[in-house]
Amino acid sequence: MAVGKNKRISKGKKGGKKKAVDPFSKKDWYDIKAPSIFNSRNVGKTLVTRTQGTKIASEGLKHRVFEVSLADLQNDEDHAFRKIRLRAEDVQGKNVLTNFWGMDFTTDKLRSLVKKWQSLIEAHVDVKTTDNYTLRLFCIAFTKKRANQQKRTCYAQSSQIRQIRRKMREIMVNQAQSCDLKDLVQKFIPESIGKEIEKATQSIYPLQNVYIRKVKILKAPKFDLGKLMEVHGDYTEDVGMKLDRAAEEPTPETTEVVGA
């Protein structure tokens, strides 16, 4: 064996053991802000790795989706069965500004509604709001006994179910197409669409527990900061003060003599 070769036999692994670094030491906390349509604006906090080289922190935060209970957003326990999805649209300072990105029911609420001896009626429809959001709305309803009914069951006929479903779609389309996303979310919170469907279908078959159980956003328009600031209402960006400039003296125009 040649002298001086295989020097590394006696030594340990090359480079030795790497020092363990706590990954949280490289991360920052950001506050999540909900739109002004909700009573409670502070949703919570989120983590992101600090800006390093070409990896920008705000880019890592954008388009994150947060799922929050409507009870926390409205400070009202009656809304606990609704889950609201909020998507991060912009980062300003340490605040992440979000916008509505969908709605859902909790599983236990949905299960508690389904019972025997009644018909379940569901309908869904794709609608476009005035500010070019394409949504898919899912509606759920259940038949109920008429006043002074002796019969144990309250099943609707298939022709009645078709009529009710048609009415549901009609109302959902009319309600969604006539307003923008912000106004539509304000209709979801008190369940005004469900109440309207219940009233409109009373003549076909009496219904109960009529809800818009789910909302999906299929297509969103191009990001517009002005629109987002409108949704966030009182939240304003610091743009500095306007300064009065002294009027500059007009400089006398020099006339050029041709052929001089």
Image: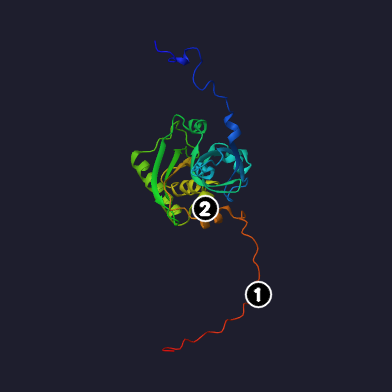
- Residue 86 visible to the viewer: no
* Residue in the picture at 49% in, 87% down: 255
Structure colour scheme = rainbow
**Element at label 1:** loop
Q: Tag on residue 215?
A: none
Find residue 158 and report its horizontal and vertical position in percent: 34, 39
* Residue in the picture at 60% in, 48% down: 93
* Relative depth, front residue between 21 and 189: 21
What is the residue that sits farthest to the top in this orientation? 1
* Relative depth, front residue between 56 and 162: 56
Residue type at numbered disc 2: Lys
Tell me if mark 2 has few (under 14), some (14-19) or many (20+) residues whose alpha carbon lies within 10 angstroms of its own.
some
- Mark 1 lies on residue: 246
- Mark 2 lies on residue: 182
Residue type at numbered disc 1: Ala
* Residue in the picture at 59% in, 47% down: 38
Find residue 221 and report its horizontal and vertical position in percent: 43, 53
- Residue 108 visible to the viewer: yes
Q: Nearer the viewer, mark 1 or mark 2?
A: 1
Find residue 181 and report its horizontal and vertical position in percent: 49, 52
Q: Distance between the Cα atoms at labels 1 and 2?
A: 44 Å
Tell me if mark 1 has few (under 14), some (14-19) or many (20+) residues whose alpha carbon lies within 10 angstroms of its own.
few
Find residue 143 and report its horizontal and vertical position in percent: 44, 38
Q: Is residue 243 above or below residue 104?
A: below
First in sequence: mark 1 or mark 2?
2
* Relative depth, front residue between 229 and 201: 229
Q: Assign the C terminus to one quadrant of the image.
A: bottom left
Residue 250, by quadrant, is bottom right
* Relative depth, front residue between 105 and 225: 225
What is the residue that sits farthest to the left in this orientation? 159
